[in-house]
Amino acid sequence: MSTIEATLKTDNQKIANQYLEKVYNATEQRNPHEPEFLQAVNEIVDSLAPVLAHHPQYMESGILERLLEPEKVISFRVPWVDDQGEIQVNRGYRVQFNSALGPYKGGLRFHPTVNQSIVKFLGFEQIFKNSLTGQPIGGGKGGSDFNPKGKSDMEMMRFCQSFMTELYKHIGPETDVPAGDVGVSAKEIGYMFGQYKKLRGAFEAGVLTGKGLEYGGSLARTEATGYGLVYFVREMLKDKGLDFKGHTVIVSGSGNVSIYAMEKAAEYGAKVVACSDSDGCIYDENGIDLDTVKELKETGDERISSYIDKHPNAQYLEDCSNIWSIPCDIALPCATQNEIDEETAKTLLDNGVKAVGEGANMPSTQEALNLFVENNVLYGPAKAANAGGVAVSALEMAQNGSKLMWTFDEVDEKLKGIMKNIYQNSMQAASDYGSPGNLVVGANIAGFLKVADAMKAQGVI
Ligand code: NDP
């Protein structure tokens, strides 16, 4: 490189850094009470300096300023009547973040912690994740502060119907296509689909994904996020001459993502020794018996502590964060955001963790993430590693549109291909922009470039 080129590069880098700082500060000022959203923004902004230094046109067309402001934020009242005849009121949200690549796409979360910051962080991440899948889908997310725990079936149905009575005005197969997330499984999707159908007076299968197989769902959608995560981590391991076989794995949570991550990791020869729920975790040194976990969590509505009743040799540890003190080679956080902080990351490193693959969205704090990267742990960030769920949701939309139904193996093969592509594209972007092997930077850049080009092509809207 000539001296002039080198100087120019340094100058461009400086300009890009100053610009990013300015954009981040403005975002912070505009969204002062949204820490999770700002955390997600910070991670992206941190990765983009080399891209903007090489392509100043993205700064000139204000791509980032526009990307950071959702196209639409909808917040609404959800009144419903409980089994005692009392009126309850919750708050519903839908954040339609970015439609440059296709209809808004992203799940609905029902959990008491849901607020605008959480929905915006999830919706923001979804833009890049959906872009990485290569499917024609934009980014969105929604949910409610409703707590599904302990609710009867009829209460769930009444809540879902009331939620959809407002949401249906804003969604549609070509507009916005929600799916499930924490607290929203095929049962809730069914209640919401029924209400949408009644209000619209039409059977529009492509309006929601994660549907039951009888009315437009896709085979392998239930398994997709957990399986996809393991396919992604397998690619990371393979590049280093490693494999799941013979390795000890810990998977936090015991919901949809965790269960199918455990299933696929075990199928690939790993020993999965621990999982958790929000109360505590179980450690079974002989390997978790997944049939018991499925019985407790998929068919029943029980606590993970009941695992011990069937497996008295296993241990139950109160406080779910204890799961990360158990030594493992591969850690798959699949429960919730920020479950791995700096201290936890240090413990994992002290215990010799080789790889971390994020099934949950943003399960590592920025400090934890930095520690993993600095210590050369193989690290699969959520945007890339858990994109299998939304990828198969897009395949569900494709099946709905063509009125076809693919076999389990067909969908699973496509999922494997998509996860491999995400891995390769992220690795390529990391090395193209000066951070070889860094999948955090690579996934952020690869996801960003496609959306940025589409936004630029569509003008200032
Ligand atoms: P589920 O509702 O099916 O399961 C969540 C699980 O996590 C439950 O076992 C829950 O326990 C547990 N949990 C919640 N908080 C904690 C905690 N602090 N410590 C330990 N366990 C906890 O949700 P999903 O499996 O669908 O989602 C899990 C994560 O994966 C979320 O971050 C979600 O956004 C992400 N994700 C999900 C996708 C999907 O397709 N479902 C797609 C991409 C990402 P309890 O029963 O006690 O609440």
Image (tube, helix red, strand yellow):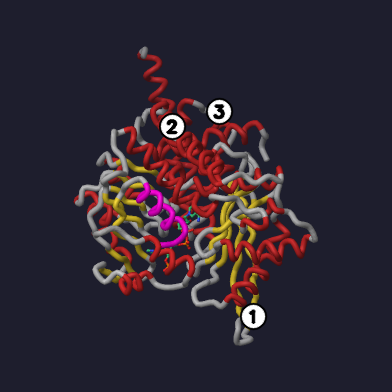
Residue placed most toward the observer, 322 or 77:
322
Viewer-side label of 2, 1: 2
| Contact? badges 2 and 1 (CB < 8 Å) | no
Q: Please provide percent x and percent y for residue 342.
A: 28, 54
Rendered location of residue 344, percent (x, y): 27, 56
Q: Quadrant of the C terminus?
A: top right
SS category of the residue bearing label 1: strand
The picture places residue 160, in percent across and down from the top left corner, at 63, 68
Q: Is residue 351 left or right of residue 426?
A: left
Residue 84 magenta-highlighted:
no
Q: What is the three-letter code of the residue carrying label 3?
A: Gln
Q: How busy is the neighbourhood of tag 1: few (under 14 within 10 Å), some, or many (20 plus)?
A: some
Task: Give me the disc on residue 424.
Answer: 2
Magenta residues? 254-267
Observer-nearest of 317 and 366: 317
Residue on which the image places disc 3: 57
| Label 2 to label 1: alpha-carbon separation | 50 Å
